[in-house]
Amino acid sequence: MTWEQKKAQSIAYLDKYKDEISQEAYDRILYVIGTQAIEDMFTTEEGVRDMIRMEKGEITTDALIEEIKERYRKKWNMAGQQK
């Protein structure tokens, strides 16, 4: 996949949920997607959903960080590792 295709895919993930958030929230997430793409990093659908949860006030940044750490501990079978 080319850089343009990867960026477009990240935006498509956001567009899938655009009716769930305000235009301002959409623009902020789109900005994050763009700045990540500049660094050759591309947002996954899970990442978009996480940003939407933060925009809606459903989760704090600190709580999301801990949740993501737990996801990776489970993914890499590191349940016994220190936080």
Image (tube, rainbow, N blue to C red):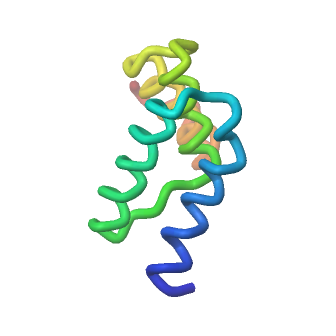
Vertical relation: 36 (above or below) 56: below
State which quarter of the image contains the N terminus.
bottom right
Query: Which residue is found at the position 57% from the left and 13% from the top?
Result: 58
The quadrant where residue 83 appears:
top left
Question: From the viewer's perspective, is residue 81 above or below residue 72?
Answer: above
Question: In the picture provided, is 41 more to the left or to the right than 58?
Answer: left
The residue furthest front is: 23
Residue 43 x/y as whole percent:
50, 55
Q: Nearer the viewer, residue 65 or 22?
A: 22
The image position of residue 44, as x and y in percent, is 57, 54
In the depicted structure, whether residue 50 falls above or below residue 16:
above
Viewer-closest of 38 and 44 = 38
**46 or 7, which lies in front?**
7
Quarter where residue 49 is shown: top right
- Extreme residue toward the bottom, this view: 2
Lateral position of residue 66 relative to residue 74, left or right? left
- x, y percentage for residue 12? 64, 59
Residue drawn at 36 percent across, 58 percent down = 34
Residue at 60% across, 48% down: 14
To which quarter of the image does residue 22 belong? top right
In the figure, is residue 65 to the left or right of 58?
Answer: left
Q: Nearer the viewer, residue 83 or 80?
A: 83
Residue 2: image location, x then y, percent: 50, 86
